[in-house]
Image (spheres, rainbow, N blue to C red):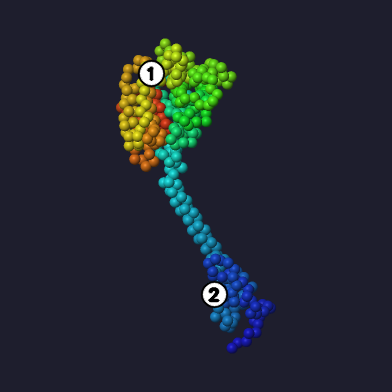
């Protein structure tokens, strides 16, 4: 057996304590590890990045080196493993991202669709149009009764926070900019002020808020006209009422320091004995559809067109027992639209068709159809009929819950015959 005497190494000495020096291991983690001995292969010694730690070639290598031979991984090999690991990690991230996107689309389609709201999908609902001055293209002599006007039912319920009571997803400003020109405003007298309600649900807005928004829009867009239904929504509330509903209405119109001045400019001067006005007389004005009682001596149309009176042809089948009866509602809508298009335009009556429904269905279900798609919603039925039907005449006032861009534009398209 050979002795364990040190071996000369370029005037240095190699001794067994070098066996504790670190070298790059063959481990896949590419970390520095300690081995009992350095690589003994001459080939590995030749390419080792730290040859100073290795003994020079020797015709008689130490026998201990043969017993503990290890494979040496170069720095290049380590970098290759790291590059491969990075590629695999990137691939996994892309795969996870794709799977997550698919899950979001399937579970919550509203995340990627403009025509979607609270999980309900509809090609004719929810997304906003932009037609802030569409009436400007129409002739002044166009009769109000000849127009096709999109509008909203329970206009101010967009923030009410109840699926049963919410009928809109846009605020009044957005509705005006979208091209809607009919608004359903329901107020209750509370402590001598008019507050906007849907049934017993307080919307958080007042009649003053509605007027100021309408007046501001009409001041900026004087070519436009607004038709507003004002309904008394139930008995007075509060303990400090000294006014009637009619008196409160007149207060905002004539006496309020906040609204009276603008009301004088923008509220239409209604004459019960006059014919229904043409557009030229209504520009920059609000025409009231009166759905509240006047004094005993006053006519039902003292302040505007009497709701469901002689000057109105109304479709309002709003009670639907369940989603399966929406087909009956659609039949009523289609017949009303056909009547509006087919009747003689003699300027004797406004035609109003409610696309909305509730009671046995949620307003959003009636508009867009149920989430499972088992029944087509009324907005889609109406929009498709207007886009593809044989009728091309007027629609009258079409009153939506959650209207979308295509529904609004399908109504507006019927006004092309009256372009200036």
Q: Nearer the viewer, residue 216 or 375?
A: 375
Q: Is residue 281 visible?
A: no
Question: In the shown orientation, is residue 260 left or right of residue 180?
Answer: right
Q: Which mark is residue 122?
A: none
Question: In x, y percent, where is residue 336?
Answer: 33, 25
Furthest residue toward right: 11
Q: Nearer the viewer, mark 1 or mark 2?
A: 1
From this view, report whether residue 342 is shown above or below residue 112. Answer: above
The residue under label 1 is: 309
Q: Nearer the viewer, residue 351 or 345?
A: 351
Q: Secondary structure at mark 1?
A: loop
Question: In the shown orientation, is residue 68 left or right of residue 307?
Answer: right
Question: In x, y percent, where is residue 122?
Answer: 40, 37
- Label located before the other in sequence (1 or 2): 2
Q: Secondary structure at mark 2?
A: loop
Question: In x, y percent, where is residue 286?
Answer: 48, 20
């Amino acid at each position: 057996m050979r002795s364990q005497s040190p071996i000369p190494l370029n005037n240095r000495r190699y001794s067994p304590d070098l066996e504790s020096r670190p070298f790059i291991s063959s481990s896949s983690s590419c970390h520095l590890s300690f081995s009992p001995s350095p690589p003994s292969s001459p080939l590995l010694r030749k390419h080792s990045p730290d040859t100073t730690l290795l003994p020079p070639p020797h015709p008689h290598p130490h026998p201990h080196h043969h017993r503990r031979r290890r494979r040496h991984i170069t720095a290049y090999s380590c970098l290759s493993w790291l590059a491969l690991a990075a590629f695999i990690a990137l691939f996994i991230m892309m795969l996870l991202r794709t799977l997550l996107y698919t899950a979001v689309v399937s579970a919550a389609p509203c995340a990627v669709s403009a025509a979607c709201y609270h999980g309900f999908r509809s090609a004719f609902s929810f997304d906003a149009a932009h037609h802030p001055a569409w009436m400007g293209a129409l002739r002044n002599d166009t009769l109000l009764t000849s127009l096709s006007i999109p509008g909203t039912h329970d206009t101010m319920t967009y923030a009410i926070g109840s699926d049963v009571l919410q009928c809109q997803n846009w605020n009044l400003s957005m509705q005006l900019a979208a091209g809607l020109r009919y608004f359903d405003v329901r107020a209750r007298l509370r402590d001598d002020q008019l507050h906007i309600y849907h049934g017993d649900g307080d919307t958080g807005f007042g009649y003053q808020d509605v007027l100021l928004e309408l007046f501001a829009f009409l001041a900026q867009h004087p070519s436009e006209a607004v038709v507003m239904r004002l309904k008394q929504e139930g008995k007075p509330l509060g303990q400090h009422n000294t006014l009637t509903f009619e008196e409160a209405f007149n207060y905002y119109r004539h006496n309020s320091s906040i609204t009276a001045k603008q009301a004088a400019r923008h509220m239409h001067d209604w004459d019960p004995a006059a014919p229904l006005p043409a557009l030229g007389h209504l520009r920059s004005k609000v025409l009231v559809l009166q759905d509240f009682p006047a004094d005993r001596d006053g006519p039902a149309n003292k302040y505007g067109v009497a709701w469901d009176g002689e000057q109105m042809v109304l479709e309002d089948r709003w009670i639907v027992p369940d989603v399966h009866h929406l087909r009956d509602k659609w039949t009523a809508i289609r017949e009303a639209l056909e009547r509006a298009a087919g009747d003689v335009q003699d300027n004797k009556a406004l035609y109003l068709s409610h696309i909305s429904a509730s009671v046995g269905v949620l307003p959003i279900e009636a508009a867009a159809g149920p989430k499972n798609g088992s029944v087509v919603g009324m907005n889609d039925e109406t929009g498709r009929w207007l886009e593809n039907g044989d009728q091309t005449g007027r629609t009258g006032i079409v009153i939506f819950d959650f209207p979308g861009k295509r529904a609004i534009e399908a109504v507006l398209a019927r006004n092309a015959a009256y372009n200036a």
